Amino acid sequence: MALRDELLRSIWHAFTALDVDKSGKVSKSQLKVLSHNLCTVLKIPHDPVALEEHFKDDDEGPVSTQGYMPYLNKFILDKPISEDAVEVTIERASVGAFKRTQSGGNSTRSHKETKSVKERERVSHEKNKTSENDTTNFTAVIVAATGNFDRQDFNRMCWLLCSRKNLDQSQLLISNDDAFKVWCIFNFLSEDRYPLIIVTEEIEYFLRKLTEAMGGSWVEERFEDYKVQLSVRQQSLNAWELILLVGSRQFIKGMDRQTLSMGITEVYQELIMDVLKQGYMMKKGHRRKNWTERWFMLKLNSISYFVGEDLAEKKGDILLDGCCSVEPLQDKEGKKCLFLIKSSNKSFEISASDKKKKQEWIQAIQTCVSLLRQGRPTPHCEARQKRGEIRLKLQAEQEDLQLRMSELQTANEAKQLELENMRKALEEAAAKAAEEERKRLQTQTELQDRYIVDIEREKIVRQQMEEQVAQKSEELEQYLQRVKEMEGMYRQLEDALEDERRARQDEEAVRRLQARLLEEEAVKRAELEEFHLQQQRAIAETEAEKQELERERLIKENALQAAMKQLDQLEEDRQGALEQYQAVMRKLEDAANNTKTWKHKVAEQEGMLRLIQPGSKGQQMITNWGPAAFSDAEFSHRQKKWQETKNEETQAQ
């Protein structure tokens, strides 16, 4: 995360805390106080007139975030750099250093030397009096641009402004310092949009980290139940809801307040302070060549060492870059597990407590050097970025799926409308044909002399109807072919469901493996506690064994996390198969509706047959093709053929 984005997130909390009415605006007097506090923490001289001059054309009252951001960028975060200001700043720093040197050195210097120093200061002040403001601005820009300020003080200032309004100290179940650390972790894991929220994936990541830091076991079912409750309201939490969730100890039952505080501190150091590894080791001095135990703290670009793990007294730093290297050394001077760190300026000999810890430190330092050479961030920052990219990709895929579903729905509606129009047209044609048949029967007795002409006309009509029936039959065959294709898709869906069932069996096996690992971990934890009570006198050896067991537990938990990731992937595959199954079911319903429509059409065509009789030769069979269009044998043959066709269609359905 960029420095500017990190600062803006904390400032957003402070700004919203000043918005008492929740109208999105803050009064200018409150913004002056906020700007002054920001400049103080960032070590930038505050210009109280700049705010009034910036908003001199806006006298309508309070200022919104859209109005305050240009001022914040121009007068606090993006001040211009002046070369003259650089010279004045350097000169002032030199004069100040000179005065401190003289005051701490020879206390008997002459009055003439003192007067000479003051004269140089006065000349320098008069020479650069006109550019004094530019000098101050340049100094502020250097501080803000390089991050040469205490980020923790900056975050605490914003925390004080927003926590008083949003957090009830009487109902807070954790200490204020722990709540501040959870707030900082929220700012790191929150989404890149305002208002700031943290999604369920990041909540699960943070709670897993916290549980691992406290040495507890993660209960997946409990978080799944909480995720269901959370989805009823929304899929995210704000900072204060996250603090209350951690304080409620819903996912860390059985842990005391001190253990919770230590876990929060460990996660805070890893995610916010970028601490990749820490622990006690022996360091060889550069002057006295003696060995001293120090508390080492590894970050991406440096290794700091302190007197103790409370970080009260810092003894030095080992700066890391792409040119650094680390290599193991042979045992010497009674020291074992040695390795050498070569930096740009110095080399440091370090002694670890055992070979395993030595190898872990060497690998951790080599990883930092490799990341620096590649220009990559810390692993947790890179992992957070990848999780965000995956969420964006899934969101884009979901939007694309919704768009495709909308297009399919529109096409389906258009097809239904087309079929409805065809049905109406066929009904009109059938009604028209029935009306013509009625008129023809009424005039049949009067038109006996035109009987031959009518027969020819009926033959033509019959031929046209047969062509139409043949065309409809072809369309029906095409439709049946589509039904067969959909049946094939349905079988594929059944195969996918079978794969899902197998995936669930694999998931159950992984769950049983997880339970067994947790039982083994509980047994090992009981053994560790027993060893700790028995070997309290030999605390150094016990500490080494405890750290070794802790590393084994971390390896097992990493394996467990990999298994859970596989389970998540299987769940995603199951959801995709379910969506395909729903799409196939919708297509089958549409096909059933179309089949009913075509049955109705065929029934209407079949109802148009009538028996026609010749004029005066007794009773004749009359059909829509005219009197005596068929003989009795021919009509029986056609009726039998039609009945067989109808039975075959019924069996096919």
Image: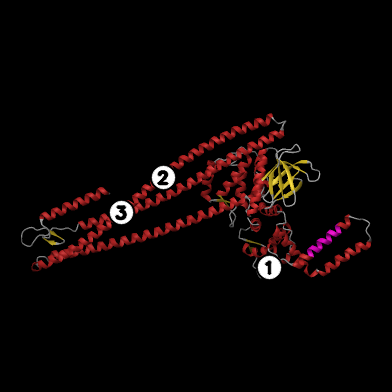
In the image, is residue 373 part of the stretch drawn in magenta?
A: no
Residue, x 62% and y 32% (percent of image)?
A: 526
Q: Is residue 555 left or right of residue 456?
A: right
Find disc 1 in the rendering and name its residue.
54
Pointer 1 local density, CA inside 10 Å: few below 14, some 14–19, many at least 20 = some
Q: What are the residue bounds of the magenta stretch?
A: 88-100
Q: Of circles 1 and 3, which is in front? A: 3
Judge whether 5 appears above or below 277 on screen: below
What is the C-alpha distance between the residues marked 2 and 3? Answer: 24 Å
**Any part of residue 277 in sight:** yes
Of the numbered discs in the image, which one, if any, rests on residue 497? 2
What is the C-alpha distance between the residues marked 2 and 1? Answer: 64 Å
The percent position of residue 324, horizontal first and vertical second, equals 69, 50
What is the C-alpha distance between the residues marked 1 and 3? Answer: 74 Å
Amino acid type, callout 2: Leu
Q: Of circles 2 and 1, which is in front? A: 2
Q: Quadrant of residue 472?
A: bottom left
The percent position of residue 306, horizontal first and vertical second, equals 74, 45
The percent position of residue 310, horizontal first and vertical second, equals 73, 43
SS of the residue under disc 2: helix
Find disc 3 in the rendering and name its residue.
481
